[in-house]
Image (tube, rainbow, N blue to C red):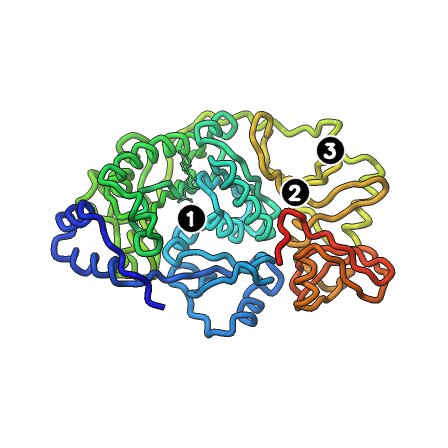
Amino acid sequence: MKEEATTLPQQFIKKYRLLLGEESTEFFCALEQGSAKKGFRWNPLKPAGLAMVQTYHSEELQPAPYSNEGFLGTVNGKSFLHQAGYEYSQEPSAMIVGTVAAAKPGEKVLDLCAAPGGKSTQLAAQMRGKGLLVSNEIFPKRAKILSENIERWGVSNAIVTNHAPAELVPHFSGFFDRIVVDAPCSGEGMFRKDPNAVKEWTEESPLHCQKRQQEILSSAIKMLKHEGQLIYSTCTFAPEENEEIISWLVENYPVTIEEIPLSQTVSSGRPEWGSVDGLDKTVRIWPHENQGEGHFVAKLTFHGQNPTCKEKKVRKKRKEQLTKEQEKLWTEFSMDFHYEITGRLLVFNDHLWEVPELLPSLDGLKVMRTGLHLGDFKKNRFEPSYALALAMKKTENIPCLSITQKEWQSYTAGETFQRDGDQGWVLLVLDKIPVGFGKQVKGTVKNFFPKGLRFR
Ligand SMILES: C[S@@+](CC[C@H](N)C(=O)[O-])C[C@H]1O[C@@H](n2cnc3c(N)ncnc32)[C@H](O)[C@@H]1O
């Protein structure tokens, strides 16, 4: 289907005609006439992640340009593949940010402006469940969506917080190996994808955004370790929010710009639009030159020393420790289901959590998700959570029940279904894909799909 032509604001045209000269003709043409490409990433944290995505997409999958896990195409938000966290819809250019960030297993990583979770899911995949990922979002509603996306992705080593960047500094000063700032911006790179981005744009937007970006970055810098890395990105073309921001960072903080080793055909940042050396090491994606929408990304190393917050060893408070009975219930369950813990176990009000090992004290923080919610203790039993089902790595030799698409539809609508047997807790799998837990009692499979997520 041909998308409607985008009508660009006059002031925008005037500005980029001046900045780009002759090149502006192709640029405007791509923005006005071209159609936005869609993309998605498959999830390497899931059993047979790639194979399942290949099986369930009937179309021939074309690789997306900036991520090894990316494909061009669309995701059906109601498909079981999406619900089970096997794929994440992401604009192809946006995938470059995670690729540049290249988080490593075992690191402490902060995604400071994280909702809805495109970069966080990419970082979590790179970390393979090891280390600590803090995904933060300032707006509560967006933080909730972020938390749900992290859960679907099956991440065990992430916490989700809901704070303004400055509020995190006292808790995480000098703490992180890597910080991603995917900044709120004037969104010019989204013009042909999202008509609202055009409507909301004014001539003043880039400078307003620049101020906010400086505030966010001045907090981010304080949370970096010595030699820690900062990855800064926007989805706008505006020099004020890209080369000028990187120049401001270099002029005000002990940071250097890193070369971004990318084999893909991307353009470099424009040195003439900033005021420091090294801007040619940053990356721009232009719609008239590359696949995908507009994007900018830079990687910097911080050479200063921030005061480190004393790594308060998190001592488990008495009420957070498992009782002997709870320990016995969890051990029985985890042995039956071969679930291996990589973090620590904590109980809050009978809810059992796997908390990332490297986590400092969370006192005073608004935390939406303290790692992986494993399940709840109820009287004399343990009830596994939906989040745990989505974080299961193995489906062999554990109590499983293979269900059909039709049964999955009943399950996501909150209904029970009939199946001969009396196995008790079972991991429900659809073509070996974990989709939730059920309890099989005398031929009936009871439903434990979370009420808030039900759909038909
Ligand atoms: C470009 S989006 C992030 C997209 C996200 N990284 C992803 O890949 O899905 C920018 C985010 O910054 C948040 N934001 C807006 N104002 C902010 C502020 N003053 N400080 C921190 N974050 C802010 C927005 O709510 C939004 O979620």
Q: Position of residue 453 (x, y in %)?
A: 62, 50
Relative side of 416 to 63, left or right? right
**Which residue: 67% across, 48% down?**
451
Q: Quadrant of residue 231?
A: top left
Disc assigned to residue 101: 1
Tell which of 275 and 36 is nearer to you.
36
Q: Amino acid at mark 2?
A: Gly
Q: Position of residue 243 (x, y in %)?
A: 25, 42
Disc assigned to residue 303: none
Disc assigned to residue 343: 2
Mark 1 near mark 2, Cβ–Cβ under 8 Å? no
**Mark 2, mark 3: which one is toward the viewer?**
3
Q: Is residue 30 depicted above or below 250 in this figure?
A: below
Q: Amino acid at mark 3?
A: Asn
Relative side of 151 to 297, left or right? right
SS class of the residue under badge 3? loop
Residue 145 appears anywhere in the view: yes
For the N terminus, which image quadrant? bottom left
In the rendered structure, which disc, 1 or 2, sits on the residue that comes first in sequence?
1
**Which residue: 48% across, 59% down?**
41
Q: CA distance from mark 1 to mark 2?
A: 24 Å
Q: Which residue is mark 3?
A: 349
Q: Position of residue 198 (x, y in %)?
A: 29, 48
Tell which of 175 and 267 is nearer to you.
267
